[in-house]
Image (cartoon, rainbow, N blue to C red):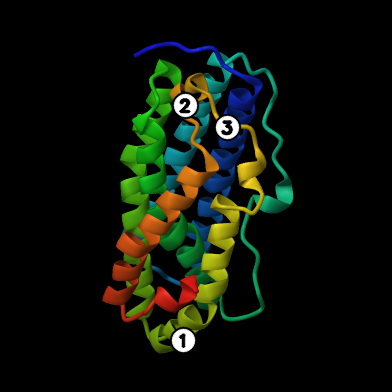
Amino acid sequence: MTRAPASERVRREWLRRVEAEYRSAAITQHLVLWLIQIGASPDLVHAGLRIVRDELAHASLSHRALVASGGEDKPRLARETLGLSRSGDPLEDDVARACVDVFCLGETLAVRLFKALRDGCTVPAARRVLDRVLHDEVRHRDFGWALLEWLLDSPQGPALHTLIVRELPRSVARLRAAYAPPGADQEAPLDADEVRWGLMPAARYRQVLASAFERDHVPRFARLGVDARPAWA
């Protein structure tokens, strides 16, 4: 592996990743509380707690990459983003929403995204993060689908199925806005050193997102009786 000079954009991106990992840990911890409150399977509760530990480890590794890049800023964590909000609907509805948004959509996409990010990454401090995250994201993805299956098999399953079908287009739209936002192509192209630090151009994010939706999201939802294809339209 080779070391490459780090640009300000590299430092900003690794700081953002530190913040994102802390946010993921907090959101998952909140979801685990909800799982306890609805009497979810102990296996799911323990799996969720393990994910919290993973996300904190990812934050620590990402911070090491940030320091290696010359970054000195501390994470700025907006407290209002470090948890899940109740809607006023039954708690099972909110659990299903979080499960779909964070895990079935987000973590399933993350497996392909981190593989793509790792492909061009040769800086040791950055590559260590991506290796660990990619390894863990597979388990995080599988947790989400196992939880969704458990929810759909519960007494509330038919109502939750209806909820997911109704709200999936909005969930997919949020995913697309987060990973392929309008105007992202206006940024200056990445140079080779930035790719070595584990960055990826916006166009590649869009490609990976489209591939993940067609090859991962659609068939996995279909196995649970949900046609996800109209949500992309």
Q: Is residue 15 left or right of residue 138?
A: right
Residue sitting at 44 percent across and 58 percent down? Answer: 103
Say if 206 sits above or below 65 in the image.
below
Residue farthest along the left direction in this orientation: 223
Q: Distance between the residues labelled 2 and 3?
A: 10 Å
Near mark 2 (Cα within 10 A), the count class, few <14, some 14-19 or many ≥20, is many
Do we see residue 45 in this rendering? Answer: no
Across and down, in percent, residue 99 comes to 46, 64
Say if 120 sits above or below 201 in the image.
above
Q: In which quarter of the image is residue 114?
A: top left
- In the picture, the quarter occupied by the N terminus is top left
The residue tagged 2 is 195
Looking at the rendered image, the disc whose residue lies closer to the viewer, 1 or 2, is 2
Give the mark nearest the N terminus, 2 or 3. 3
Amino acid type of disc 2?
A: Val
Say if 212 sits above or below 190 in the image.
below
Give the number of the disc on residue 162. 1
Kindly state the secondary structure of the residue where label 1 is placed: helix
Kindly state the secondary structure of the residue where label 3 is placed: loop
Near mark 1 (Cα within 10 A), the count class, few <14, some 14-19 or many ≥20, is few
Residue toward you, 48 or 1: 1
Looking at the rendered image, the disc whose residue lies closer to the viewer, 3 or 1, is 3
Residue toward you, 63 or 40: 63
Give the number of the disc on residue 4. none
Give the number of the disc on residue 189. 3
Across and down, in percent, residue 96 comes to 48, 72
Amino acid type of disc 3?
A: Pro
Give the mark nearest the N terminus, 3 or 1. 1
Residue sitting at 65 percent across and 37 percent down? Answer: 187
